[in-house]
Image: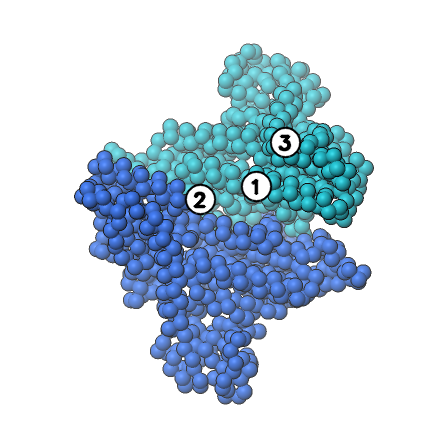
Chain colours: A blue, B cyan
Amino acid sequence: MNDKQVKEITSRDEDFGQWYTDVCKKADLVDYSSVKGSMIIRPYGYAIWENIQKILDQKFKETNHENVQMPMFIPESLFNIEKDHVKGFAPEVAWVTHGGNEELDERMCVRPTSEVLFCDHYKKIIKSYRDLPILYNQWCTIVRWEKETRPFLRSREILWQEGHTMHETSEEAKEETLRMLHIYEDFQKNYLALPVIIGKKTEKEKFAGAVETYTLEAMMYNGVALQNGTSHYFGDGFAKAFGIQYLGKDNQLKSPYQTSWGVTTRMIGAIIMTHGDDHGLVLPPKIAPIQVIIIPIGNDEEVLNTTNMIAHQLKDANISNKIDNRDKTPGFRFAEAEVKGYPIRIEFGKRDLDQGLVTIVRRDTLTKTTVKIKDVTNTIISLLDNIQKDMYNRALTRRDSMIYTANNYDELKEIVTTKPGFVKVNWCGNVACEDKIKDDLGIKSRCLIEDEAVDGPCVCCGQEAKVKIYFGKQY
Amino acid sequence: MNDKQVKEITSRDEDFGQWYTDVCKKADLVDYSSVKGSMIIRPYGYAIWENIQKILDQKFKETNHENVQMPMFIPESLFNIEKDHVKGFAPEVAWVTHGGNEELDERMCVRPTSEVLFCDHYKKIIKSYRDLPILYNQWCTIVRWEKETRPFLRSREILWQEGHTMHETSEEAKEETLRMLHIYEDFQKNYLALPVIIGKKTEKEKFAGAVETYTLEAMMYNGVALQNGTSHYFGDGFAKAFGIQYLGKDNQLKSPYQTSWGVTTRMIGAIIMTHGDDHGLVLPPKIAPIQVIIIPIGNDEEVLNTTNMIAHQLKDANISNKIDNRDKTPGFRFAEAEVKGYPIRIEFGKRDLDQGLVTIVRRDTLTKTTVKIKDVTNTIISLLDNIQKDMYNRALTRRDSMIYTANNYDELKEIVTTKPGFVKVNWCGNVACEDKIKDDLGIKSRCLIEDEAVDGPCVCCGQEAKVKIYFGKQY
């Protein structure tokens, strides 16, 4: 490939950060704007987000969640009600101080997350156990005043969904926290082809105001962790702070138990950094806005008729596709198809058709095969399925090959300085050790490993370990 | 009807404003929040908006529009580029002045509309005639710092879509302006059952920065006008202000021509105020989240089996439905079904089933009919269709009966003070007359009537008239 677009993509192994930016731009996913820290999501990038929304929204509705829309502003006094929460978010909110020409009596922040807005509403609508559970979700934009930003990964404005639920008992709320964590895990595995490690965050890393935070940790091509979604159990802390009470079946006033959970456009960043290569983006078929690109070579009538016939057949089989018959060289169009990451490319000219054949190219492996025209649709149906599975399995194998075990501090240091990836260690559970590892080695705790027994002392202090835990560099 | 919920709805003819607020609240469409001027859209209200989005989004995509997502903030210097635009919007924007604890170098407003953000992007992506047309749309929230707010009609935060397009020629841009106006008209007529008058706004009333603004004017039950969508032609004014140029087929640098068009959740307000009655909301079947409510009376096994059978049959026929078998009196459940405006209610008990019958109640007319169980689904399919048509025709007849003609100022004054509705007049085209009518009589120009010939002097000054025009009170 020596066409212009592809040449402009930096090699992934040479400069991963630059490669990422190149792919985001060259694949027309995003553009920068004059608004510092905010990105423009272009049609192709937004179409991926629309697919994500469609699938997740259906899963939320199947599990009886309802969509609502809360205000985007939070008056300062409301924001201040839950102390841990405000402490966690205050440094990174945008403040509105004026409406038109007038200064506001009370300033308001643009929501960085909406727990307090939901609680303010719950206080009015929850009266009795009959009103529970309340299972709400919201698709919206939030704002966090980040200093360093990067398309999809860290932006001042974030498109996301935030679920907020209230339950009679802590058991039910914990069950919901895990239910949504597993819906995210299943979605990321089966649709985005992303292997994720799920587990509980440490006390230090949990969400501001939560009792427990569960995370989905994906590993990017360069071994760096991306926190790709969270699900929080709040206990009744917010409910008490906001005075939310319901009359139980036993006629007693009680506080309900709460959860929240969210995923963002960051998942698009994870797709890019897990599956992309030096030719550009590689999209999993189940999330690709265009699954098949058809590139006819030449203007022969038979070529154009076959192009249209294949496009119709694919459409009838519910396979999204697009014809690229622009007045550009085949090489240019092939290269662009690779940059854009369409899962399958079909190419053919008059000579191929004379033999009754077309060429099919898999984007993930760039493997070419020749198939009979009459077999195109069936071949593509099974190929899309294989690509989806293969992409997941390749990502899983690679991820697993980059998970290491360290038994003591020297081993940990050696691994961190020489091998990108995650490190599994025994830990005493003290924040002092967590902080030391972070400050010395630049890695942060990812999540606790609750289904593996401790098999040695704390990797940091050498005292008795309480739990196994993953560490890793993070975005 | 003497059940509690219904009794709490003020009579529509007694106090229309209070009736509207009661319906919004009692039908669980919205709730007020602690955020002044912002509303909470509750699940039932949001489900109507989701239906609106689904239908319109498909119509936009069928006409080759693509969705994007722009930043929500506009730096002040960017906002200031187009002079008419900033003058129109500056008094009603929310200003962000601080990020975290730091004051911003330049304050930013929350977008009140996104013309300048799109232009800033277009400047980068439009180079050649090959890049045109650009047909973008965005679903998002905008903010306008309104003093007086009312659910759906006027809110500080508005959910809407905004289309922004760029074209090679003014003809194409004008064609697009009208295409989208007609898509809105068709949608409001055929889905929302709302008759609308479409036409051009006067110079005074057009959008800040536009060359021409087309409007959709609906008339509410009380005769007051609701501007229910607009489509703007901008010429190349913004393009020139932003320095957007493309290389034409003739190798000359040219300015492209622009449009924008938008509709908001205000359409839900129009549905309520056009179709609602003293029992509550009345939803057109094509937009109702639940088209049929099934209310079994008693707990007899045959009753419950029939309930489930009907629900399944309706679902198989793609008719959305819900069973209400809560432990409440039939009267309570009937009243609630009426407040919620479900287009059709099915009710039956053991005695009805013994005769092989169920009762079907139309929400729009409250007419009851008895049908054989085996005919339920077919009856409902045609009934939904009839309800949709009848609702439109009733609204149209009522609307037309409230449009008056005034030939001179005395007639105009007489009509405005005695008869709610629109008034059609001849007008000289001078803003002085438009202002006098507004200041004296409290009515504003709605839109020009371009397909009717002038047939008398200006209703205000008595000089030669240039055009016919509608006036009316407005929300």
State the image coordinates of residue A80 (x, y, percent, origin top left). 65, 62
As drawn, the label of residue B67 is: 2
Q: What amino acid is labelled 3 in the image?
A: Thr
**Nearer to the camera, B123 or A292:** A292
Q: Inspect this view and state whether residue B115 appears.
A: no
Mark 1, secondary structure of its residue? helix
Same subunit, tags 3 and 2? yes
Query: Which of the 4 quarters of the picture holds residue A8?
Result: bottom left
Q: Earlier in the sequence, mark 3 or mark 2?
A: 2
**Residue that numbered label 1 is attached to:** B316
Q: Which residue is mark 3?
A: B379
Q: Secondary structure at mark 3?
A: helix
Q: Nearer the viewer, mark 3 or mark 2?
A: 3
Query: Compared to A382, does B20 lie above or below?
Result: above
Give coordinates of residue A51: x percent, y percent.
Answer: 46, 50
- Vertical position of residue B381 compared to residue A95: above or below: above
Return the chain for callout 1: B
- Secondary structure at badge 2 equals strand
- Closest to the camera, between mark 2 and mark 1, is 1
Residue A104 visible in this rendered orientation of the protein: yes
Q: Position of residue A43 (x, y in %)?
A: 40, 46
Instruction: Measure how far apart labels 2 and 1 are at the Cα level.
Output: 32 Å
